[in-house]
Amino acid sequence: MAIVEVKVPQLSESVAEATLLQWKKKPGEAVAQDEILIEIETDKVVLEVPAPSAGVLGEIVMADGATVTSDQVIARIDTEAKAGAAAPAAAKAAPVAATAAAAAPAVAAAGGSKSGVAMPAAAKMMADNSVPAGAVGGTGRDGRVTKGDVISALASGVIAKAAAAPMPAAAASARQPLQQVSAPVVDLGDRPEQRVPMSRLRARVAERLLQSQSTNAILTTFNEVNMAPVMEMRKKFQEKFEKEHGVKIGFMSFFVKAAVHALKKYPVLNASVDGNDIVYHGYFDIGIAVGSPRGLVVPILRNADQMSFADIEKKIAEYGAKARDGKLGIEEMTGGTFSISNGGVFGSMLSTPIINPPQSAILGVHATKDRAVVENGQIVIRPMNYLAMSYDHRIIDGREAVLGLVAMKEALEDPARLLFDI
């Protein structure tokens, strides 16, 4: 018997522990080398744990939901056993692991290769829609199934028949999301309730938001922006821009450029507090708040002042795709000197964003809507966007905050300013 241990990957210094999500194999089942066995959730990212060797999963040491640390042994693989012959030690973990495995959505095609393996968000969608493993072709890296692949397959009706087909009781149980197994709905007649534990990411977000409100003296200043000049510029150059760079030019690149423009004029907006010191950063790392299936994440545009419009748009698109598939790395979400939150994509008219510590300011962007405004004594219709900037009043005075937001407004209403840095 040759036993190979499956261990937790090395976590970053800022991550002390993680949580096991769903085992994709049961003791006694064959596994292929590099086949994904389980996902591990930290307070920042979800990590995949591949099988270090081919063989049979002999023992699950740590069941779904367990808290683990770097290099901890979570399972063992017998490289010489045959499928169906689990190691005796597996009996201890089998009852717990079997329940969790029944809840885990099937995400790998027969044979266990990377091709056909579903990303976490895609796996959940497949489970929720009763889509069997192997029914969706993957277009992601190494042939993996993305959430977009599942959406396209469902929309085209290719897997509608499979999803609608009756399933045995055991299979029906297996397709339920993990949270429904671990936290069943309480039957209260027409007023049901369900208690679901916070994910590590959600708990971490809650912790940081409370930290921000308890340690910062948060104030918010507002202004309105006529987006017509930006919209006209986008319309004029969109076709050529997309042809040249392979990506569409959106509003966010303008907001990033306008923010950097203002931060250069008022460096304290790009600073942070460290004890009794104010740290002025000589670089501009802009965090972009992105919604993901796991919650809010804030990947960082490093050295945004050195990025072109095309660089910004490509990076934002890349981060958006990674967020949807749960593939953002810890290093991509660490740091940042200023953040931008775009509630406008969801239709928000106005909000007061909360500072992302240890940063000292954040820009909130909202939906652009046609509104009646007064220009030169006349009422006219203009596409207006309301900007909100929250700032830490401990180090940023109202003057710098207001003038900083005005600098962003002026840059957006006259984008040529961004070219000449005026």
Image (spheres, rainbow, N blue to C red):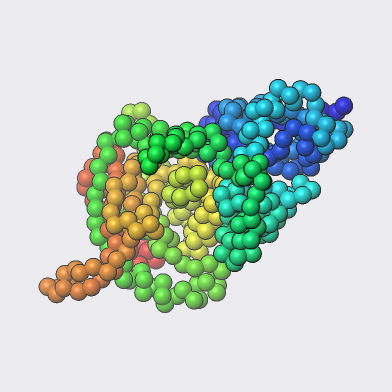
> Quick check: 366 above or below 215?
below
Question: For the image shown, how many numbered marks are present on the structure?
Answer: 0
Q: On the rendered structure, is 144 left or right of 337?
A: right
**Residue 81, percent from left and from top:** 86, 32
| Quadrant of the rendered image containing residue 41 | top right
Q: On the rendered structure, is 255 left or right of 97?
A: left
Determine the residue positioned at 21% across, 47% down.
399
Q: Nearer the viewer, residue 298 or 31?
A: 31
**Residue 217, percent from left and from top:** 26, 36
Determine the residue positioned at 58% across, 31% down.
65
> Quick check: 205 above or below 414?
above
- Residue 300 in sight: no
The image quadrant where one finds the N terminus is top right
Determine the residue positioned at 32% across, 31% down.
215
- Residue 1 in sight: yes
**Residue 154, percent from left and from top:** 58, 61
Determine the residue positioned at 80% across, 26% down.
87
Q: On the rendered structure, is 395 left or right of 177?
A: left
